[in-house]
Image: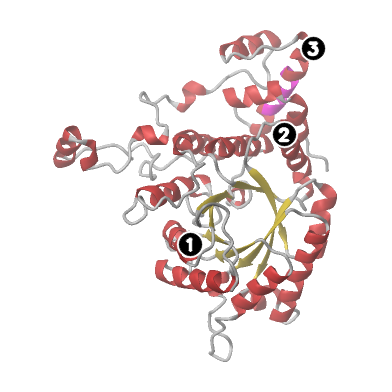
Amino acid sequence: MIEPIVRGDKPRVYLIDVTNRDGVQTANIGLSKLQKTMLNHYLDQMGVFQSEFGFPALEHETNYINANLDLQKRGFFKNIRLEGWVRATVEDVYKALKLTKVEHLNISISTSLIMTIGKFGNKINRDDILKMMTEAVDAAREAGVKTIGVNAEDASRTAAEREDQGYDEDYLMKFALAAKKHGADRIRYCDTLGYDHANSIYDSVYMLAKEVQLPIELHCHNDTGYAVANSVEGAMGALDAGVDAYINVTVNGMGERAGNADLVSVILALTKSRGLKDKDVLDPNVDLAMAWKIANYVARSFGVPIPINQVGVGSNAFAHESGIHADGILKDRKNYEIYSPEELGIPNELTLESGRIITTGEYGGLKGLKHVLSKINVDLTPEKERRVLQLVQLGTAHNQKPLLPDELRFIAEYPDEAAKLMTVTP
């Protein structure tokens, strides 16, 4: 009998944030390389296990990725794992490893017949898909990549109807077993179109995990509004089969089309909902008190305001207006709240975002910069003053927004890495 793959004392749920990979693919918006770096910093502080921090085979990401890996060695990131995404081709793997020092990869290819035909026509069949995936895994493993996740894009539709009206339930199993045989550490089950629902994804993941005995990642989109529910129920399927689960999340649910599973919502569902709050299934390193800070930073950086009814961090998340609700909350908050603002790190006096903006920037001078830095307890040596001023000016132009205190502090403390990640070489 194959022993289950478990990282801790029991199967648990770990978080992999994909804001810097999938979230930035949201149409019409994006993050600067400095903002992506700060997001990795906040995710690290929050205790998130891994950040899918970019595309190592994409040349304009090279300096950013290598700078972040350098920052990890210097201790700017304490515990978070930084992992890159590539297509399941040997060429992408080799290019990623030539351009960057990335040590963890997720390798992706579609498993549904719908996408196999829709993307490749008659040029590639499903046996070719297996061959491409296993060759890419072999290339990564032989090159010394430390951990390899294999992504089954559109996994939820792999069992969709074939041209002969039959079903192909076992192709995904075949795909996952081949990935394991060639050295994959995890299988990513992608509900790419939000096609699954809670019962079906639990059944599919349980069956897959039970047979393959590898940890399962859940990557769920929100096209039908099920992203959080499907992520949680899919994770329960993996845990019940005896292996760890990894839920892919994005801050504020950002992502293509209707977005991905929201980071804060997933944490609250795993720790506050009926049947789960007492099971202690979430990675104990996760710090919910970072929720408000990270949600507001990402909202500001993307330029997308947090909806007033956003789970946990929306401005109305703890607002009570009706007579019955107001009366109940004044008597005991637990009448109408299953978690408190303090748990999410929401300040007692909500500070307006504009109140935290530092206005030294693209056209500022040295005296103004030194004054602003003194307010956040950052002192510059005379040797660093001009260089940091230049980088703050560049950073403001890079972000197209005034820099926040944490961004200024980062630039002052890590000027070489800041310069590197903000430099894009054509």
Residue 125 in view in this figure: no
Closer to the eye: label 1 or 2: 1
Q: Is residue 87 left or right of residue 153?
A: right
Instruction: Specify the label residue 71 is tagged with.
Output: 2
The kind of secondary structure element at disc 2 is helix
Say what amino acid the circle numbered 3 marks: Glu
Q: CA distance from mark 1 to mark 2?
A: 34 Å
Q: Residue at x 48, y 44 (%)?
A: 284
Residue 88 in view in this figure: yes
The magenta segment is: 389-395
| Residue position marked by numbered label 3 in the rendering | 383
Closer to the eye: label 3 or 1: 1
Q: Is residue 224 left or right of residue 70?
A: left
Q: Callout 1: few (<14), some (14-19), or many (20+) C-alpha neighbours within 10 Å?
A: many
Instruction: Specify the label residue 239 is tagged with.
Output: 1
Closer to the eye: label 3 or 2: 2
Instruction: Tell me if residue 25 comes above or below residue 293 in the rendering.
Output: below
Q: Is residue 381 left or right of residue 22?
A: right
Say what amino acid the circle numbered 1 marks: Leu
